[in-house]
Image (tube, grey):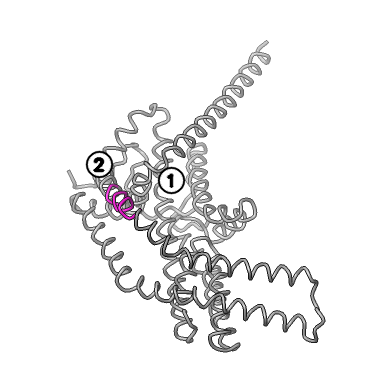
Amino acid sequence: MTTLGSRRERWTALAIEVWATIGVLALLYLVGTVIGRLAGALVPFGLALALVVVLRGPVDRLARHRVPRALAIAVCYLGAVIVVTVAMLFILPAFGEQIGALATALPGYLDKAYKLWLQVTQPQGTPVVPGWVTTAVLNLKDTTVKSIGSISSQSITIAFAAGSQIVTLVIDVVLALIVAFYTLLDLPKLLEEGMRIVPERFREETAHGVATVSRILGGWMRGAFIDTLVVGALIATGLTVLGVPYGFAIGIIGGVLNIVPYLGPVVAAALAGLAGLFGGSPWLALWAVAIVFGVQQFDSLLLYPRIMSKNVDLHPVLVVFSLLTGATLFGVPGMLLAVPVAAICKGLFVYYYERRTQQSLCTEDGVLFRTPKGDEDGASVEDGTGQQPEREGES
């Protein structure tokens, strides 16, 4: 009878878990539907959330050095304004000029590339490759040329359309700055009050989950920005020194697209090869592709894994493994989100393992399981308040 009762209890518990999971999924679907309907109104809050995630660490570090939070936020805002101003004054004009010239020259480059393809594949007038390959190359070239022509012909219309949205964009940015300011200002108290809503037995897990996700997302954004900046600068500098036409614009394109790992250098190599081949010489094209390929190898094998490992506390081998797994399972979105998802899963696994076994898994000199150096988000997992514990000697 006891065995039958225990089995019944297990099946009841399993049924409750299944229905709870279904309920959570249904709730997530409902929330996603509502967010989709309100997407336009939620843009300022999305921008504000990104600002909070990025600036929370610096603001908390300044606050721990007895800088008032309002002043700390103002300092971080000033730094962001300086960065944006420098980009607007020195980078964007040169980039806009080169990207316009590249868009004008690219159709001619593609026509020359197709003629060169015909010379290689039909040296004596007899095709050496299947006809469908040549047809596919021709269709790709025509589609690309038409797309570039369409964008160019509609540039004035697009400019007017974009101009009509400038006011909305400015309002969204201003609202995001205001929302982010007050969120960062009251963040410790907001976390403390939020924890009061959570049942006491789930408070520690919730606090740890929020702290883990916040720390990893902030680190991932910082890492992606640093990697994008370094890759773009290396490609742009190498191509410009080499004398490749539009090298600065190609470098920036490669850096920005590198937010999806491996994508930026591939596009940059194709553009650099075309610009070097038809704006210079075959040797220039070969060296241009070699430079981009070298940057891509440096980024893939050393730079990106190291940067992400330092910012999200994930071993470089696990960074590469998560990228390959994400790309295989979910394509480009998988590559984009693989590292933060893997880091969050690893952080939660370590927490629950240590809690269940009562054994410390992470060490300061660990390899796969390394203790994060400092709580950059400033949250206290132990008390679940989001406040830093008082240091000895402080009142």
Residue 235, position in %: x, y?
48, 76
As helix, strand or loop, the secondary structure at mark 2 comes to loop
> On screen, 35 above or below 57?
above
Q: Is residue 288 magenta?
A: no
Left or right of 329, for residue 195 = left
**Residue at image point 23% right, 51% down:** 63
Quadrant for the C terminus in the image? top left
Left or right of 249, for residue 194 = left
> On screen, 106 above or below 52?
below
Q: Main secondary structure of the magenta part?
A: helix
Residue 361, position in %: x, y?
50, 48
As helix, strand or loop, the secondary structure at mark 1 comes to helix
> On screen, 4 above or below 239?
above
Residue 33, position in %: x, y?
49, 35
Considering depth in this image, is 349 or 220 the residue closer to the camera?
220
Residue 366, position in %: x, y?
49, 56
**Crowding near the residue tagged with mark 2, few <14, some 14–19, many ≥20 C-alpha atoms within 10 Å:** few
Residue labelled with disc 1: 213
Q: Which residues are the magenta region?
A: 165-175
**Residue at image point 72% right, 84% down:** 119
Q: What whole-number distance in Å separates the C-alpha atoms at marks 2 and 1?
A: 19 Å
Identify the amino acid type marked 2: Asp
Left or right of 329, for residue 59 = left
Quadrant for the N terminus in the image? top right
**Residue at image point 63% right, 17% down:** 6
Residue labelled with disc 2: 186
Identify the amino acid type marked 1: Val
